[in-house]
Structure formats: structure tokens, C-alpha cells
Amino acid sequence: MILISSHLFSQDYDQFLYKHKIERYKHLSNTGRVFIGSGGILTAAGIISAGLLSQEKELSEIELKNRIIVSYIAVGAGIDLIIGGFIMKSIGAHKTEQYQEKLNNLSGGIIFSRECKGLSLVYRF
């Protein structure tokens, strides 16, 4: 009886663990999407800012260099965010699918009916 109850507890823990991991990897995937969007906006802002600098004639040489540097930093940071976002999104989506499949493959319970009393454990593969 102790062996059976520890096995059921282990199964409940596995289901809890899989559900927890699914939520964490969904969060990672969503964070990746936010990074992609933020990176796109930052990259576009950097490119537009650099393009508008040629039209400004009242800037001193130092101000112009500073704005060019800020524009390049914005474009570089935006591209980094986009790359990181794609990596996070792809890992999160893959792992969410992997643990969702494991959760769907594991089921079990206690059966109490007139015809049958016992335990069931199903693992589909």
C-alpha cells in the first residue's frame, strides 16, 4: 500500500512539475515576443533618427557626433533584442510543446466502481 501511494504521489508531483514548466516556458515565449517588438521599435527609431540627422543644419559637430552615436547604439540594441527575442520565443515554444506532450501522455488515478476497484496508470508513447 505504501508503494502504491508513493507512486500516486510521484505521479501527482510529475503532473504538477509539468504544469509548472509549461507555465514558465509560456512566460519565456511571451517575453521573447515582447523583446522582438521592442527591438523592432528601437531599431526603427535608431534608423529614423540617423536619417533625420542629415536634415539638421543647426547642430554643432559634437552634438551631431553624439546623436549619431546614440542612433547607432539604438540600432545595435534593437537588433540584439530582436535576436534574443527570437531565441527566447523559439526555446519557450519548443519546451512548452514538449512538456505539454509529456503531461498529456501521463495519466492515472484510483478506480472505485461496483465491477472494479484499483489503481490505473497510463503512459502513452
Image (tube, rainbow, N blue to C red):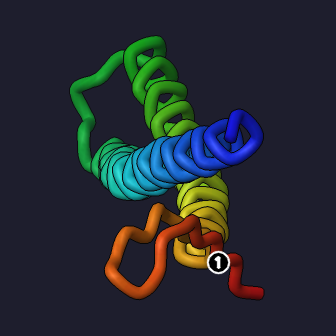
Viewer-nearest residue: 24 or 116: 116
Position of residue 13 in the picture relative to residue 29 (left or right): right
Q: How many marks?
A: 1
Residue farthest along the top direction in this orientation: 62
Q: Residue at x 47, y 51 (%)?
A: 19
Q: Residue at x 48, y 63 (%)?
A: 109
Is residue 15 placed above or below 101 in the rendered structure? Answer: above
**Foreground residue among 60 and 63:** 63
Choose top left, top right, bottom left or bottom right for residue 17. top right
In this view of the protein, can residue 79 be seen by the observer? no
Q: What residue is shown at x 69% (from left), y 47% (from top)?
A: 4
Q: Secondary structure at mark 1?
A: strand
Residue 70 location in percent, x, y? Answer: 46, 26
Quadrant containing the N terminus is top right
Image quarter where the C terminus lies is: bottom right
Where is residue 98? Give x, y as percent: 66, 70
Residue 105, horizontal then vertical, whole percent: 62, 77
Residue 79 left/right relative to 87: left
**Relative to residue 117, is residue 19 depicted above or below?**
above
Q: Residue 16 appears at what percent x and percent y?
A: 49, 43
Q: Amino acid at mark 1?
A: Val
Question: From this viewpoint, is residue 108 visible?
Answer: yes
Q: Nearer the viewer, residue 11 or 86?
A: 11
Q: Residue at point 54% right, 70% down?
A: 107
Location of mark 1 (residue): 122
Q: Residues within 10 Å of mark 1 (few under 14, many from 20)?
A: few
